[in-house]
Amino acid sequence: MENEFEDRLIPATSVGSGIGKPITTDIYCLPIQVVNLFFVGEPGQKWVLVDAGMPRSADEIIEEAEKRFGKDAKPEAIILTHGHFDHVGAIVELLEKWKVPVYAHELELPYLTGEASYPEPDPSVDGGLVAKMSPMFPNHGINIAEYVQALPSDHSVPGMEGWEWVHTPGHTEGHVSLFRERDRSLIAGDAFVTVHQESLYKVMTQKQEISGPPKYLTTDWKAAKESVIKLNELGPLIAATGHGIPMTGDFLAEELQKLTDHFDDIAIPEHGRYVD
Ligand SMILES: [Zn+2]
Ligand SMILES: [Zn+2]
């Protein structure tokens, strides 16, 4: 295992980077630069890490985890919504310390076992400077074959009782979202996000607005649309996404309905390498 992302840093950080916030008593959102990761579990109890942040953020993640769960606390497992570099950036260092199992959708495994690279980001999509900068984002897969395995086929989520995983392809083939019926909490990864992720200004200020998956890295727009329809049908009351501030209640319901109804206008770029 080695971390090939070490030298690939992104010159952008949102205003809230490093400032963690509880969304519910047992879901804690930690923004790292431009991406969110989540601790799921009551403070001091067993917990699971969802997604693994940006390159070089392992120390920050470990420190924050120990603050919440106690000294030398390590998660029961790490669940990945998908394997893009901004969701697995710190995972190699985290695994060196924690040595815990990692779960992802089976279609995502080739990108996590060194067998495949993601398609190149597309800087020609409309939307702003982050899209323009996207060619510097690493697209190659990582190799954590020792630790990673497919999510259980019964849709349960290891270490997260009461949650189910939902296959939400489009942004990547094996992208998953996590849903808990009890309080209708949704961790949506990049299936949709709550910030206009292509715009540097909006990423830095974290202006809250619903948006489709980040355009420069999404390759199958038909599947992406079906995934948003599927998530809207679940009727989430809380949505924690890979980018942007978590959204809740009526505002979420209205915004997600709007995205579902006008997906082609809101989400799909007017032109781009992965648009028909
Ligand atoms: Zn992504
Ligand atoms: Zn992302």
Image (cartoon, rainbow, N blue to C red):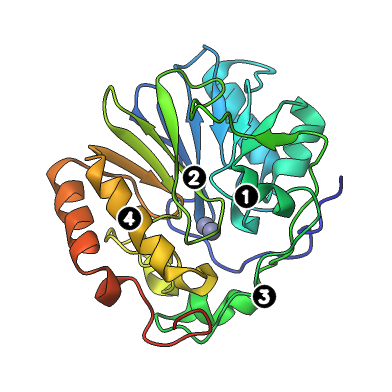
Callout in the foreground (4, 1): 1
Q: Position of residue 219 (x, y in %)?
A: 52, 70
Q: For this view, does 152 lie left or right of residue 168?
A: right
Q: For this view, does 67 lie left or right of residue 181?
A: right
Q: Position of residue 169 (x, y in %)?
A: 48, 55
Q: Position of residue 220 (x, y in %)?
A: 48, 68
Residue with the most extreme right position? 1
> Residue at label 2?
176
Callout in the foreground (2, 1): 1
Residue 131 shows in the view? yes
Q: Callout 4: 10 Å neighbours few (<14), some, many (20+)?
A: many
Image point 48% across, 85% down: which residue?
Answer: 272
Image quarter where the N terminus lies is top right
Callout in the foreground (3, 2): 2
The front one of 246 and 160 is 160
Q: Callout 1: 10 Å neighbours few (<14), some, many (20+)?
A: some
Residue 193 shows in the view? no
Image point 78% across, 48% down: which residue?
Answer: 113
Q: Callout 3: 10 Å neighbours few (<14), some, many (20+)?
A: few
Q: How far is mark 2 from mark 1, CA to CA?
A: 10 Å
> Residue at label 1?
107
Measured along the vertical axis of the image, is residue 227 above or below residue 182?
A: below
Residue 228, numbered label: 4
Callout in the foreground (1, 3): 1
Element type at mark 3: helix
Pointer 2 and pointer 1: residues touching (CB < 8 Å)?
no
> Residue at label 3?
136
Q: Earlier in the sequence, mark 4 or mark 3?
A: 3
Q: Quadrant of residue 20 in the image?
A: top left
